[in-house]
Image (cartoon, rainbow, N blue to C red):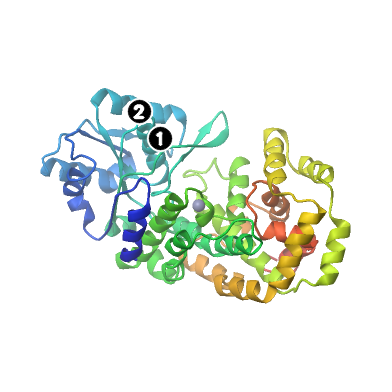
Amino acid sequence: MRRLIERGLALASDTQVVEVGRGRLARSGEILARTVLAQGSPALVVADERTFAAAGAAVTAALAQAGQTLAEPLIFPGQPALYAAREQAETIRQRLASQAAVGVAVGSGTINDLVKLASGQLERPYAVVGTAASMDGYTGFGAPISQNGVKLTLPCPAPAVVIFDLDVAAQAPAAMVASGFGDLSAKIPGGADWILADAAGVEPIDPTAWELVQSGVDRALSQPQALAAGRPDAYQELVSGLILSGLAMQVYRGTRPASGAEHYFSHLWELSHLGQDLDPPLSHGFKVAIGSLAMCAFYERFLARRPGSHDLTAALAAWPDWSAVEADIRRRFHGALADNAVRQTRDKYVDRAGLRQRLERLISDWDEIQERLRAQLWPARQLQDALRAAGAPTDPAQIGLSVEAVRQTFPQAMYYRSRYTVLDVARELGWFDQLTDEVLAPGGLWT
Ligand SMILES: [Zn+2]
């Protein structure tokens, strides 16, 4: 894993140093002093009450011991949970600007996103000291921020330095590592989606980004019980896997290496504010866990079939023209989301000639494609067992959703982004509704 991280760092645009291991907190002052703080700027530690207690105080002490100048730490309340809003980023930006400081985010998702955005606006590098293995956004660029009830991903560089102490990660609340486990499980169906997009000639696989994100996934997901039990050594692979996922996105300059259709389930549920009234709010990784299960189950049904010339004839005869597709999108979405889905789907829509080309290629290459997909995917039951052992949700009801709601999300996830996934392939083959029904039929994962 270390070799892969070094490889990712050599190619990544923003991140220069990644330190993962036990006892890293005590060394954080020295690490920061020779990297982001080497020019002599004061450090502004940004945390909330919980993450300051977990690691912020130790980072502050380590910085002082390393002889660094410290601005007064900026500590947000621990309760209710901080959310990523522009006002909060603005508070951080002002503090960084007035003190001419370099930000040291101590926390996980939200704290990192806020400091990332504020530092990006000032065009200053920053560092993050992770406190939980809860998601793969540590080394990602861009910050998802809420504004007027809509989620936007604002462009900003990834951190220059990432420090992760495994003893801290192991002591984080159990739900957080379960969330990170869920987020990393997305690389299984998400990778399969990339294989299909590659095979269809829509989006070729970048071998380097692929190797970074995929080579450690199976190992990182191999010891869910040890993670749930808080054994620090078990965290090495999971934390490395999450960090590699972000590095792969930096190398690829896009999110394809880390996400496929399973993430669109999560985004859509987030847009409908699912679980946002909980404290802490329903995590990204928990929604992704259910999305990943839905997609692994969909792939199982997909791979149980074999496309042939009869599918091609039927698909070409039934292929809707664009106006019918747009009407269907507008039935399933409203307002700005509908306009967005129309634009996104238009990007990947092909006419009958284009469809014939795509499907003929799929049919003739099927044996090879099927073999690649089988090597990539896990059986849905196996993933369900692993998620359960990690403490992640394995049933939509656990995140407040009915099976019917999941059914409605399938076509929305297909239309939501221009990214080409198995949902598009199934639609093009005329299999979409049947496969969805099969996934949710009695005897399946959730009935
Ligand atoms: Zn994710």
Q: Residue at x 84, y 55 (%)?
A: 319
SS at mark 2 in the image: helix
Name the amino acid, label 2.
Arg
Of residues 51 and 7, the one drawn nearer to the viewer in this rendering: 7
| Disc number for residue 117 | 1
Q: CA distance from mark 1 to mark 2?
A: 8 Å
Q: In this rendering, does residue 379 appear at all?
A: no
Disc 2 residue lies near ligand 1 with CB under 8 A? no
Q: Residues within 10 Å of mark 2 (few under 14, many from 20)?
A: many
SS at mark 1 in the image: helix
Q: Residues within 10 Å of mark 1 (few under 14, many from 20)?
A: many
Of residues 98 and 207, the one drawn nearer to the viewer in this rendering: 207
Residues tagged 1 and 2 counted as in contact (Cβ below 8 A): yes
Q: Residue at x 34, y 67 (%)?
A: 234
Instruction: Establish if 168 lies above or below 114.
Output: below
Of the image marks 1 and 2, the number of the one nearer the N terminus: 2
Q: In this rendering, does residue 71 appear at all?
A: yes
| Disc number for residue 66 | none
Quarter in which the N terminus is drawn:
bottom left
Q: Is residue 400 left or right of residue 29?
A: right
Please provide percent x and percent y for residue 75.
31, 34
Name the amino acid, label 1.
Leu
Tell how many labels: 2
* Residue labelled with disc 2: 93
Instruction: Establish if 49 lies above or below 212.
Output: above
Please provide percent x and percent y for residue 66.
12, 44
Please provide percent x and percent y for residue 94.
33, 24
Q: Is residue 248 left or right of residue 201?
A: left
Of residues 98 and 106, the one drawn nearer to the viewer in this rendering: 98
